[in-house]
């Protein structure tokens, strides 16, 4: 018998049904397949796997895309009368923005189903589910991020005790192993339902807040079990991915399925570029799309930056929808504050890429209150946070940063680090001061013949009509623009720290930023020209 959990089912909300078997199976996760086939009012057909949730109960979650009369048929292998049935249900109208979709070539590559373009401002909280399972107040953290205007969090489902520098994180008080058995003696045919109930709770909180998640299905390839493909064989990998899809694919807050963090670690956990990893990524992306009916974008997150992704995935260019791109730029004592080199590497790596992308990592802002366990973070200060964000956004990419307070081994969800305020200014600039969706990179507007010190070269965005031009000066100074003929512009300086605007004076496209210093460094500025 199929039991409906929802009192009312609305379009683009998660509906859930439960089925109860009278049998007890030795391996219910691995040896029983339950599938719901949904027939929509316009002839659409969707197949959704159900998931075992303990107590001889299987659950089926689906998010209907259309209002009207629907029919559900549930089948099982092996045949089990308690896990089969048929029913009709009605979906009510509901005007919402819907799922996030990768839309390469339109705006900055991302829209909601209702057509609203997305400027991604994200935070990296890899261990969010594990932190919640160990008692941290992640609900308040999520509420604060949503209120601040963040719309995407990078999270991973498997929280490993094998991540450097010290393995178990400082906050770890409970096991977060998502499979059966233990890390020492894993049972990949079973899943840790107590931990996954915590994942449910956090995902449902994000859903209620309208906060998007990039869900990383397999964590770093150097972590167990992903570095032991002789143990974590394809059969167990598919069982794991299918379970994640069955349990979470219906949620609107799942914006992106990322196959693996730094996917080039496949198959042996060695950090290097490996063409075998490309073949794995394309194969698994197609597998996910064949089994996940809601159409979320499928992405990879990179380690090595080259060769370009257009070359890596040329064999099947439609398999990977998005690159969650990382490039930290300079992070040494001399140039870390400038985050030098980010836009050049983005240009090289994404050259010719026809999919979508997000600038998903450029470091984790250092909190001096924590021990310096990770040397690469030492010079990732507020200046690095801010300039990295502006450099990435001026490549027409959404941005996702991270903070030592919350990214991984440390835990201080109650306090925000200084650079977070600067990220909020970036968001306000692109969503309230200039319409980001109309802008594209316009390096051709930089006047020829000008020379700039490393890291000082301005970045330029412009509308196709030429009526709006924006330039970012990472260390102040001057910018000389070759502006379209026949247009007169009103110019303003935008302060990336305070968010204030002031009139700018210039002649023949030449503008010099106000001389200013912030926290001992040459001030950065953004110039806005409106026809």
Image (cartoon, rainbow, N blue to C red):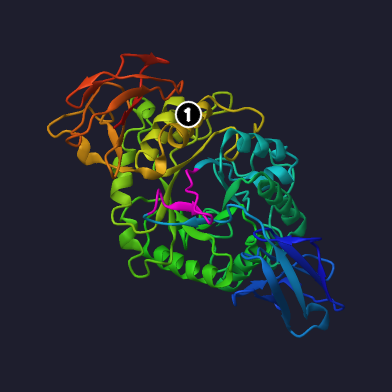
Q: Determine the secondary structure under disc 1.
A: helix
Q: Main secondary structure of the magenta part?
A: loop
Residue 392's place in the image compared with 370, above or below, is below
Reply yes or no: does residue 252 show up in magenta: no
Q: What residue lies at 23% left-to-right and 20% top-to-bottom?
A: 506
Towards the viewer: 40 or 33: 40
* Label 1 sits on residue: 425
Q: Is residue 286 left or right of residue 416?
A: left
Towards the viewer: 494 or 458: 494
Q: Is residue 124 left or right of residue 461?
A: right
Residue 150's place in the image compared with 180, above or below, is above
Towards the viewer: 448 or 270: 448
Residue 382's place in the image compared with 240, above or below, is above
User: Where, by quadrant of the figure, is residue 416 drawn?
Assistant: top right
Does residue 269 appear in the picture of this structure?
no
Does residue 498 appear in the picture of this structure?
yes
Image location (x, y in percent) of residue 401: 49, 38
Reply yes or no: does residue 113 show up in magenta: yes
Which quadrant is home to the N terminus? Answer: bottom right
Q: What residue lies at 49% left-to-right and 53% top-to-bottom?
A: 115
The residue most toward the bottom is 79
The residue most toward the left is 449
Q: What's drawn in magenta, residue-wise?
A: 106-120
Callout 1 crowding tier (Cα within 10 Å): few <14, some 14–19, many ≥20: some
Q: Is residue 402 left or right of residue 481?
A: right
User: Where, by quadrant of the figure, is residue 355 drawn?
Assistant: bottom left
């Amino acid at each position: 018998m199929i039991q409906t959990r929802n009192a009312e089912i609305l379009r683009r909300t998660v509906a859930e049904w439960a089925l109860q078997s009278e049998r007890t199976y030795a391996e219910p996760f691995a040896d029983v397949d339950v599938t719901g086939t949904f027939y929509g009012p316009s002839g659409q057909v969707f197949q959704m796997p159900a998931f075992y949730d303990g107590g001889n109960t299987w659950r089926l979650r689906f998010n209907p895309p259309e209002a009207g009369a629907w029919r559900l048929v549930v089948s099982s292998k092996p045949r089990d009368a308690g896990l089969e049935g048929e029913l009709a249900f009605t979906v009510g109208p509901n005007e919402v923005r819907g799922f996030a979709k990768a839309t390469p070539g339109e705006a900055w590559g991302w829209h909601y189903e209702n057509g609203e373009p997305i400027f991604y401002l994200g935070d990296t909280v890899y261990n969010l589910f594990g932190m919640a399972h160990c008692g941290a107040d992640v609900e308040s953290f999520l509420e604060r991020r949503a209120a601040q205007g963040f719309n995407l969090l990078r999270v991973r489902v498997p929280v490993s005790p094998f991540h450097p520098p010290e393995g178990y994180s400082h906050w770890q008080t409970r096991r977060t192993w998502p499979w059966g058995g233990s890390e020492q003696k894993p049972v990949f045919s079973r899943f840790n339902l107590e931990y996954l109930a915590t994942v449910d709770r956090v995902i449902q909180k994000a859903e209620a807040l309208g906060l998007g998640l990039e869900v990383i299905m397999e964590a770093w390839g150097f972590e167990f079990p992903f570095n032991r493909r002789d143990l974590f064989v394809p059969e167990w990998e598919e069982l794991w991915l299918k379970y994640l899809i069955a349990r979470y694919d219906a949620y609107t807050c799942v914006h992106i399925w990322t196959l693996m963090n730094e996917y080039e670690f496949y198959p042996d956990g060695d950090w290097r570029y490996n063409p075998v990893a490309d073949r794995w990524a394309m194969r698994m992306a197609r597998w996910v799309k064949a089994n996940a009916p809601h159409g979320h974008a499928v992405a990879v997150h990179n380690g090595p930056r080259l060769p370009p992704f257009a070359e890596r995935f040329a064999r099947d260019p439609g398999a990977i929808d998005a690159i969650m791109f990382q490039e930290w730029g300079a992070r040494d004592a001399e140039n870390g504050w400038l985050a030098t080199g980010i836009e050049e590497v983005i240009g090289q790596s994404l050259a010719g890429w026809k999919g979508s992308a997000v600038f998903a990592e450029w470091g984790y802002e250092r909190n001096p209150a924590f021990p310096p366990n990770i040397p690469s973070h030492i010079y990732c200060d507020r200046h690095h946070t801010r300039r990295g964000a502006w450099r990435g956004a001026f490549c027409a990419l959404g941005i996702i940063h991270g903070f030592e307070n919350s990214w991984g081994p440390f835990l201080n969800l109650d306090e925000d680090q200084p650079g977070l305020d600067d990220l909020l200014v970036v968001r306000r600039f692109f969503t309230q001061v200039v319409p980001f969706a109309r802008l594209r990179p316009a390096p051709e507007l930089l006047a020829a013949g000008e020379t700039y010190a490393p890291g000082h070269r301005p970045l330029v965005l412009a509308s196709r009509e030429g009526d709006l031009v924006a330039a970012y000066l990472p260390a102040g100074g001057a910018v000389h623009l070759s502006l379209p003929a026949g247009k007169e512009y009103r110019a303003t300086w935008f302060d990336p720290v305070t968010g204030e605007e002031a009139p700018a004076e210039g002649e023949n496209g030449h503008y010099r930023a106000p001389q200013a210093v912030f926290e001992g460094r040459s001030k950065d500025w953004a110039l806005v020209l409106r026809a």
